[in-house]
Image: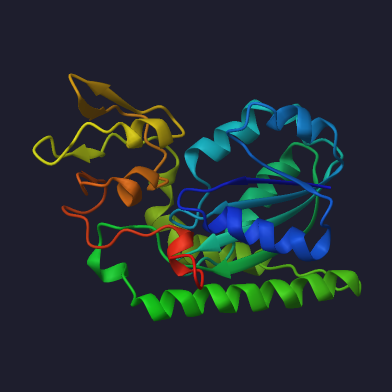
Amino acid sequence: MLGIYFSGTGNSRYALEVFLGKLDRKAEICSIEDKNAVNSIKDNQEIVFSFSVQYSNIPKMLRDFVVQNRDLWQGRRIFVIATMGLFSGDGAGVLARLLKKYGAKITGGLHLKMPDSIADEKALKRPLEKNMELVRRAEEKIDRAVLGIKNGKIPKDGIGFWCHMTGLFGQRLYFGRKAERYSDKVKIDVEKCVGCGKCAGLCPMKNISLKHRLAFAGDTCTMCYRCVNTCPAKAITLLGKRVIEQGTIEKYLPGKG
């Protein structure tokens, strides 16, 4: 069994680690950014795919990975975990349908509400205690899901016609196109930038580079929010005008924040 993920601030990676830690401790886990990811997929027929939903859709970078490696999915049994900050009727279903198009057999899906990664929008921020509670509840839901799987009752969150309709009409028709293309909206305040290069090193798309000891962004942002949440100078924004609160999954784990 293989666990594969795409994660901006660590929610989907953590969810996958907890899930496989309870289901199959021997399972390998890797990111789609890993240079050995394709070979790992080739070596495994059972896959658990974990990702974070964007506007009730698949992140552009993840969609490209699936499409570019379309021949990999034929005949593979795939369970989909979708993490989200708000509501998504069929987050897991969007990826499931794409994988199914290329011959995968979708075994089930799991939706997990997690701390929101959009650090520059005040309306989406929650108190620390609330975010820690979200993680605790997600862990409890994973426990129930794994127990169900072991007893032959596989969860089907986001899978099926009615889930598809809920996700489509509830959100994706209005906002879903935002995740269908790369963004050129990353803004870097050169007055705040200290030129540390952390953002450039973390960007999965290599969309940020350093010039004259300052960071500059291009037009291929996949909106993972990794740079916004980790910039030590809070110099980067994407959807909002200023950084309200930064956070990665470690902040919400007891004793690790």
Vertical order, 176 against 157 (above or below): above
Q: Quadrant of the C terminus?
A: bottom left
**Residue shown at the point (25%, 57%) measured from the top left:** 120
**Residue shown at the point (80%, 39%) measured from the top left:** 103
Q: How many marks?
A: 0
The furthest residue to the top: 212
> In this image, 179 relative to 152: left or right?
left
Vertical order, 5 against 127 (above or below): above
**Residue shown at the point (40%, 31%) measured from the top left:** 201
Quick check: can you spot residue 159? no
Quick check: can you spot residue 99? yes
> In this image, 188 relative to 197: left or right?
left
On the image, the x and y values in percent for residue 198 come to 34, 36
The furthest residue to the left: 191
Vertical order, 29 against 123 (above or below): above
On the image, the x and y values in percent for residue 172 come to 46, 57
On the image, the x and y values in percent for residue 24 come to 83, 58
| Quadrant in the picture for residue 215 | top left
Vertical order, 70 against 94 (above or below): above
